[in-house]
Amino acid sequence: MSAQIVFVHGIRTSATMWRSQREYLDERGMSYTAVDLPGHGTRIDEDYSLQEALHTIDVAVRAAAEKGPVLLVGHSLGGLLCLAYAGSGEAAPLAGLVAASCTALPAGAGLAAYRLITRMTYMLPDQGMWISRRMLAATIPPETRLDFGAGGYALDVQDEVLKSLSALDLASAVARIDAPLWFVNGQYDQLRRNERLFCRLAPHAELIMVPRTTHLVTAMRPQIFNAVLQLAVATLESDVAARS
């Protein structure tokens, strides 16, 4: 059975952020699903809740598992949620997990500062979109720059999303994950601050560092991220074949 990939996007963006990965998989005839979390993308008019976000992942994983072994892939917020889901003890069986740009515990002063910055930015006349556009223009190549906003920006739910993350016990969740696990971080990603802790909690995990890359690793160096997907798929399909 061929691998089934489930993508979970980051905060503010939507399933459109995975365009480069989807095109790569389409060219190879590989199966995938890219979800929109509540309050984002096609669901931007919905309220956000942590419970519904995890439920969204669960529904997608269980549907994909009926067709083959599941590789769960999350970026930033999506990565944190995927780690929490995979280590919850209630997750559907996973063949593997790629967690990108999310090796930071969302708690304490770091989370409080991020929420404060987000609230202050939201109060600007354009809700800070000019800042976001300048940052994207400075870091993301033109061919992937528009992917993050193609499904709209979920600005109204940002603070609720960040607030909800404090309820996650990620340290315990990561320690419980026994499926093959890859942490993927950009060299200059600000969310690398607990990287060593995450690797200690999951000693079987592989850490892949993408040079000259910040937080938006999937768009800054899509070829490298796609190669990581290929590696993960080959690994889990080899594991499945060995057990057959």
Image: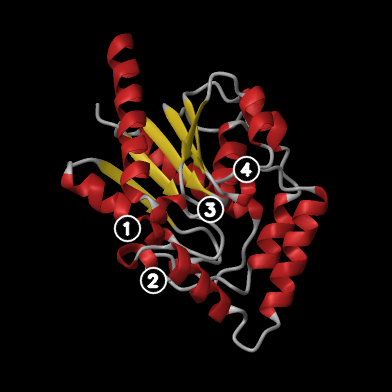
Q: Position of residue 195 (x, y in %)?
A: 63, 35
User: How many marks overall?
Assistant: 4
- Reply above or below: 64 against 196: below
Q: Dot 1: few (<14), some (14–19), or many (≥20) neighbours within 10 Å?
A: some
- Reply above or below: 106 against 43: above
Q: Earlier in the sequence, mark 2 or mark 3?
A: 2
Residue 131 disc label: none
Describe the element under mark 4 as helix, strand or loop: helix
Q: Amino acid at mark 2?
A: Ala
Q: Earlier in the sequence, mark 2 or mark 4?
A: 2
- Reply above or below: 128 against 145: below
One can see residue 134 in this view: yes
Residue topped by disc 1: 19
Residue topped by disc 4: 192
Q: Position of residue 175 (x, y in %)?
A: 65, 25
Q: Amino acid at mark 1?
A: Arg
Q: Dot 3: few (<14), some (14–19), or many (≥20) neighbours within 10 Å?
A: many
- Give the distance between the C-alpha atoms of the residues marked 3 and 4, in whole angstroms: 9 Å
Q: Position of residue 149 (x, y in %)?
A: 43, 70
Residue topped by disc 3: 215
Mark 2 or 3, closer to the camera: 3
- Give the distance between the C-alpha atoms of the residues marked 2 and 3, in whole angstroms: 19 Å
Residue 150 disc label: 2
- Give the distance between the C-alpha atoms of the residues marked 2 and 1, in whole angstroms: 10 Å
Q: Quadrant of the C terminus?
A: top left
Mark 1 or 4, closer to the camera: 4
Q: To which quarter of the image does residue 161 belong? A: bottom right
Q: Residue at x 57, y 47 (%)?
A: 54
- Give the distance between the C-alpha atoms of the residues marked 1 and 3, in whole angstroms: 17 Å
Q: Position of residue 159 (x, y in %)?
A: 70, 66
